[in-house]
Image (spheres, rainbow, N blue to C red):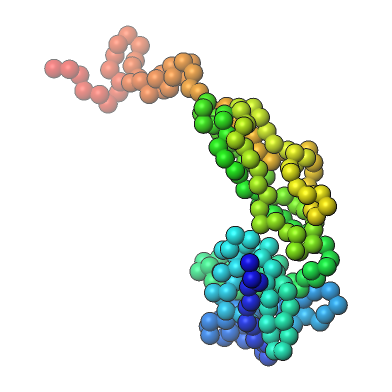
Amino acid sequence: MPRLTVESQIRQEFGKNANRRLRAAGRVPGIVYGRNMEPVAVSVDPKDLDRILLSDTGHNTIFTLNYQDQERDVLIRAHQRDPVGEEFLHADFMAVSMDRTMAFDVPVEIVGTAEGVKMHGGILDLVVREIHLECLPGNLPDHIRVDVTDLQIGDSVRVEQLDLDADKVKILSDPDLTILTIAAPSVETADDQIMLEDETAEPEMAGGDQVEGSQPAE
C-alpha cells in the first residue's frame, strides 16, 4: 500500500490568539519532533487528521509529512479535540526512523465466532483491547488477530498464546494477561423469579384490610 502524504505549512505566529485564528481559517496547529531534530511548528488540514485516525491503522499510521522543502516519516503521537464541538485543537507528529524499533499499542481483532457463543449462548468478554509491543515501524501489524472459533464456555486467551513472529515483533505486555474469556450466559433462577414476583405484587394489609388510598368495593 502506498504511503499516505500530508501537506503541512510552517507556522510563523504562536500563542493562543494565533492558534485561534489558525483554526478559524480551517487549519490545525501542530508540532513535529523526534530524535536529532529541532521541533518544527506546522499547521495541517483537519480532514487529513480525520483520514488518518479513522483508517484501519489509526494512530499507528506512518505517513509522510511535507513542509517547506523537507519530508519526514511521522505518526500522530497525540492530538487534542474540543470537548464540545469535537474540532481538532492541536496535533503532535513524531518523526520515526524506519531502522529503529519503537513501542506501539496495537488493537486486538476478534476472528470468527466462538463455539461456546454460537452453540451454548455464551458471552465473549474482551478484557484487553490493545497489546503493547515493540518492532520496526515497517513490521508493525495493523491488528493482532485472535481466532476464537474453537473456544468453549470457560475458555480464555492469554497474551502468551498469541501467534506473532518473534523475529519481527517483541511483545511487551504481561504474558499472563488475559485478553478475552468466554463466559457462561446469565440464567434467571426460580428463586430470582419468586423474588421478582414478591417485589411487584400488590401489597395487602394484615387481615385483608384495604391498602390506604384504595377504594372499597361496592
Q: Position of residue 194 (x, y in %)?
A: 43, 16
**Foreground pick, 17 / 89:** 89
Say whether residue 216 is visible.
yes
**Foreground pick, 120 / 169:** 169
Q: Position of residue 204 (x, y in %)?
A: 33, 16
**Foreground pick, 162 / 86:** 162
Q: Tell me the quarter of the image containing the C terminus.
A: top left
User: Does 204 sit left or right of 32 as displayed?
Assistant: left
Residue drawn at (83%, 52%) of the image: 167
Say whether residue 80 is visible.
no
Q: Residue most toward the top?
A: 207
Where is residue 4, by image quadrant?
Answer: bottom right
Q: Residue most toward the right?
A: 36
Q: Position of residue 21 (x, y in %)?
A: 57, 86
Residue drawn at (58%, 84%) of the image: 22
The count of marks equals: 0
Residue drawn at (62%, 37%) of the image: 148
Q: Position of residue 121 (x, y in %)?
A: 51, 28
User: Does 35 sit left or right of 181 as displayed?
Assistant: right
Q: Residue most toward the left?
A: 218
Q: Tell me the quarter of the image containing the N terminus.
A: bottom right
Where is residue 17, by image quadrant?
Answer: bottom right
Q: 49 above or below 24?
A: above
Residue drawn at (21%, 23%) of the image: 215
Q: 152 above or below 130?
A: above
User: Does 184 sit left or right of 167 as displayed?
Assistant: left
